[in-house]
Image (cartoon, coloured by chain):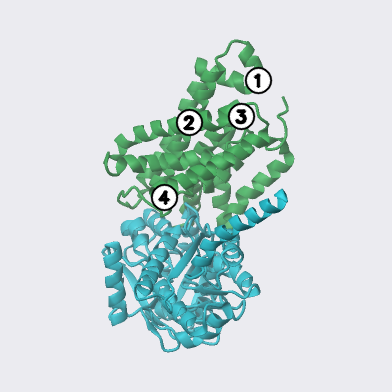
Amino acid sequence: MKKLALLVAVIAVLAFAAAPSARAAETIKIGAAFALSGSIAVYGEGFKKCIDLAVEEINAKGGIKGKKIEIVYEDNKSNPKDCVTAVRKLITVDKVPVIFGPAGSSNFMATAPVAQENKVVLISAQGAAVGLTKAGEYIFRVFPSDTLQGPHLAKLAMSKGYKKVPVMYVNNDWGLGLKNAFVDAYKKMGGTVTDIIAYDEKKTDYRTELLRASKGNPPAIVNLTYINEGAVQFKQAFEMGIKTQWLCGSAARAPKMVELAGKAAEGVIGTYPSVPQNTKQYQAFKEAYKKKYGDDKIPIFGDYNYDMVYVTARAIERGGYTADGIRKALPQAAKGFKGVTGDKTFDSERSPKFAEYGIWVVKDGKIEDYKK
Amino acid sequence: MDSISYYLQTVLNGILAGCIYALFAMGLTLIYGVLNFVNFAHGELIMWGAYFLFLFMGEPFGLPLYAAIFPALALTGCLGLAMDYSVFRPIRRANRLTLLIAAMGLSVFLRNAAQFFWGAEVRTYGLEVTAGMRFFGLYITAPQMAIIAVTLLCVAAVYLLFFKSRLGKSMRALSDNLDLARISGIDTKRAILAAWVISAVLAAVGGILLALDTNLSPEMGVINLIKAFAATLIGGVGNLWGALLGGMLIGLAENLGVLFISPGYKDAVAFVIMVIILLARPYVIIGERSD
């Protein structure tokens, strides 16, 4: 009898303990497996700021059908293994139907099959790698694929009269994908690639790689690099007296890179999926960001993260708060939606159908749009 | 750049990398010699040393570089002592696996602590980037000359300390046989404390030089530690000259390797050397020392 009483008591306690989580279910939870520590936490902190801004705005306007959005952040530690752990935790413990995926194409691509198998929607706001969404119909991105960027970079090299270039790239899914897209397009345009140099991320010393790339004093070197890696490389190239025109992709285009590299980054140019800044959407975003954080240094890809929240919220509103509902509603929710980063209509690969590319240049310590 | 200076520049790059590895390896090997375990938290001493300098150069101290170096080194020395006092001293007689795991845990803790204080973003000391000076077709910058000069100085200082002073003698005695040293009336506590301070200061010197030459990030220690570890293995663990030699060898091997194989395999050079040596001498990590 005593045992039974105890059992009842335990059940009662458990029921009470469970009550708050029942209340918590009234919020709309979205998972975010972000780099909050590790090598690319530089990006993660900026994404989080922009996501929080969008969530705050949507919640202030009454949330989604009266329910507030809550983002469950999970640190992915910037490496593929812990990205998978983070995504698994969000799926099994937090039971979210939709997750904002990790940055870094290799990281994202490690988690995509997990989300696909568990039938949970996974969205990327900065994955540019060519095959990023190939894992299946639950995987989306609001950032344009490098299939589109490679030819633009090749065109840039040709238009500046560089018909022979060595290519350096960071050895991961993003670097490799863009390198292939560039080399294919460049060769078709009649260009010659003199050397291909893959290098690892996170190194502190790239001197010998740079030396090899600069053999024969090429007038231009294509370097598909990141923020930290780019900063170290431009600095070391400058110190070693390597004088060349650097041609980069989108991932190095960050004020942080210029801050780290100082005057060594002066004159670096590159392509990037451009976001027209004169639209009223962009201006409103910039204003809101400044109001919340006190500066107008919009973090790299922050605008895409901001749009991702809105597109997802629209899909939840239309399709309901289930993974299948969101997956089916996403294409309609995005169709014709004019976000901060432009028209977010998806193509058949669940990637943005439209993308404009601009050319960036480092001038007087600032990143500007390149004018011929 | 003609082809001779092309190769010479690569050799110089290798020497620069080697100096940094050697400074790290010397501290690592010293603790191994005296306390007989691999301090996997050594990388965090490297990183904290660099960040301490960043601390003293920034607000509210705002010291110039040359003045900020001394408190930064002193504080890193204290951190070394604190590591010993709080973690390693209570388990001094524990088996190696316990020490190894404790060191790894400490490493993660210190790395996250640095990230808590300074954030995960990469930082610099904010010094102006300057083009290197040209000697015989080779480019070398002021921080790089400092790397070579300071490494030589450290090696000389450690040599004098180790082979010409009583303290050094007691450390070497400890390294040979802890119990015998104790019975012979050597102040083992003092020698152990000295070993921690020297190891931490060497780590800080290396870390600061590395950060001056490149950047600061919470990961800077752990990334380079594995190379330092390989260097100590090559040189024979517990052997200071070996650490210097091992560091240089790895620096040169990986840089010269880049000219011939894909640079994507740069790290592989160090790892291959390390694996071969571990296969030949596995007792370094898991087993007992031969004595």
In space, the residues marked 2 and 4 are separated at their CA atoms by: 28 Å
User: Mark 4, chain letter?
Assistant: B
Which of pointers 3 and 1 lies earlier in the amino acid sequence? Answer: 3
Q: Amino acid at mark 3?
A: Ile
Q: Which residue is mark 2?
A: B82
Q: Residues within 10 Å of mark 3 (few under 14, many from 20)?
A: some
Q: Amino acid at mark 1?
A: Asn
Q: Which residue is mark 4?
A: B214
In space, the residues marked 2 and 1 are separated at their CA atoms by: 25 Å
Q: Viewed as shown, does residue A22 lie left or right of A339?
A: right
Instruction: Reply above or below: B65 against A233.
Output: above
Q: Which residue is mark 1?
A: B177
Q: Are marks 3 and 2 in contact (CB under 8 Å)?
A: no
Instruction: Reply above or below: B162 against A196.
Output: above
In space, the residues marked 3 and 2 are separated at their CA atoms by: 14 Å
Q: Are marks 3 and 1 in contact (CB under 8 Å)?
A: no
Q: Position of residue A362 (x, y in %)?
A: 32, 67
Which of pointers 3 and 2 lies earlier in the amino acid sequence? Answer: 2
Q: Residues within 10 Å of mark 1 (few under 14, many from 20)?
A: few
Instruction: Reply above or below: A217 against B266.
Output: below
Question: In green, which chain?
Answer: B
Q: Amino acid at mark 2?
A: Ala
Q: Amino acid at mark 4?
A: Thr
Which of pointers 3 and 4 lies earlier in the amino acid sequence? Answer: 3
Question: In cyan, which chain?
Answer: A
Q: Which residue is mark 3?
A: B91
